[in-house]
Image (cartoon, rainbow, N blue to C red):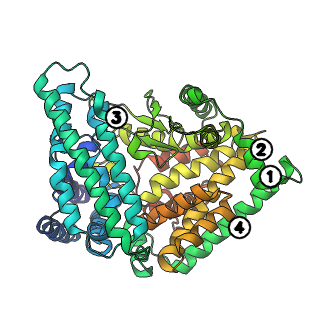
Amino acid sequence: MVKLEISSVFQELSKKLIKEYWDFYPTNGSRIGQHEYDGNLPDLSPYQTSRRERELQRGIAELHSIDVNNLNVQSRMGYQMMELFLRRELFVSKDLKPLENNPMRHVGHLNVSGYIRRNYAPLEDRLRSATKIMTQAPDFLDVLNRRLIDNLSSHVMDMSSESYSGMARFYRVDLADATKGIKDSEIITGFDNARMKAATELDKFANRLKARGASGPEGFAIGPDLYSGMLATGEGLDVPLSRIAAIGQENLIDNLTQLKDVAQRLYPGRSVPDIVHEIGRNHPKTHDVIPETRKMLEEIRQFLIDFDVLSIPSEDRCQVMETPTYMRYAFAAMDSAGALESNATESYYYVTPVEDGWNIRQKEEWLSNFNYDTLKIISIHEVYPGHFVHHLHNRYGVELPLVNRVATAYSFTEGWAHYTEQMMLESKYGEGQPRLLLTQLLEALVRNCRYMCSLRMHTESMDLDEATKFFMENAYLAELPARREALRGTFDPGYLNYTLGKLMILKLKSDYQKENGSAYTLKEFHDRLLSFGGPALPLLRPALLKNPGNDAL
């Protein structure tokens, strides 16, 4: 069989395997733009998850029946992406076992905001789909409750309880006006009944989570073996943890040294916390955060075009709006349209506002996090040229295979966005802006701390108080945000991937520039990097380099 025929066999198999994934996780199919899956929640019962694990094992065996050496170059990468995608899901289900110990992984299935906000079909049809999801929510929550083990970390349960309570509030408050303009009383009544009942059940579930976590804080660490497995299956990275820790520590020290140097050149004799406080005072007023963010985005976008930083393959813009209540643990976040969405291209850049009930001091503290310099760095990460531009390349990429759009890696998606912060400050955009450089370094230090605390919390017995102190001392965070960062590490050990992915991209860029010499351009590197979707970064080295070597870091 010739390579073209073998590659065709692989493409058909990959479509089948991805369909099986969507059949089991219909919310993921719906979210990427396959609306035949609308209105359905996954069945996470023991019988169905065991069936899915057997299906994954069969899928891996089918994949291995194809000789990878007889695939063309594009299909060979797709094969590797598909294999990692299946192995990752199987590893998460059988080894990490989040259904037993990590409810945070499942709250996203209950998010119906896409049905309300994205105009891919008549509102009446989208409301019916949202109603179906919320009608199924009580049974879905009952399955989750029955599958959880008894001895659970109070840290993970507290954060999970907060998230499910936030979803209840989203149903009860944020969705109250979703049926505005609808004249069909049956649709309105069904939607309102479903959301109120689901909100009640979400609150009950949140209370159960609190009770389950009452036994103590221990139990969140996954251990070194599972940590290595997470990196191997999720990021295609087979590197000793001692080396990963050493590389992370070196980058942390480099950023701390550079920060202190910039701080002293900018404000001689003043402490870093004092300088951070000074920078934080220069922020938009409460009601100006959203409009000023919109203006800022256009300015950054135009810079990318004027200085040939990378291609922006669409005139699409994201809509800047307040963060939904269930997501307000984050200052800002990007919610992009599905890569396979055919009728709706709306993407949303969420910016978290001050709360009405806060006092003047609390509002000022929150707004200080949206000072103009920090807002620029966050917007670079989330929108231009970070997550939103990556999304545009995935959505409008010429002949990008299905597996490349679906099987994305945590280290690529967050590593790219984090890499762009440093890249922009090293470009003409950063010239004459030492305060912006200082802010970029502070953001990098937060990610450095995530990297180190993730490793130490999950493989070296670091506790929450120690992790909180680490963020305070090395990222100059106040105690409350430092503790929130540490808490995230209890349920998301993968949050080292911001820095891990960034470091792999920087090494890839350095090696690519050396190979291409005078022919190298930053734009060409970025466009090639983004042309593959979001694969595990070690897979990109053979695609971009003549001599890829074996060292992604």
Tell me the mark number nearer the camera, choosing from 3 and 4.
3
Counting residues from the start of the chain, the first of labels 4 and 1 encountered is: 4
Tell me the mark number nearer the camera, choosing from 3 and 2.
3
Q: Residue at x 26, y 48 (%)?
A: 110
- Determine contact: label 3, label 4, CB under 8 Å: no
Query: Vertically, is 58 above or below 284?
Result: below
Question: Secondary structure beneath disc 3?
Answer: helix
- Label 2 vs label 4: CA separation? 20 Å
For label 2, count other residues whose C-alpha is less than 10 Å away and answer few (under 14), some (14-19) or many (20+).
Answer: some
Residue under pointer 1: 262
Residue 195 at x, y percent in the picture:
22, 39
Q: Is residue 242 left or right of residue 252?
A: left
Amino acid type for the residue under numbered disc 1: Val
Amino acid type for the residue under numbered disc 2: Pro
- Determine contact: label 1, label 2, CB under 8 Å: yes
Residue under pointer 2: 434
- Label 3 vs label 2: CA separation? 40 Å
Name the mark on residue 174. 3
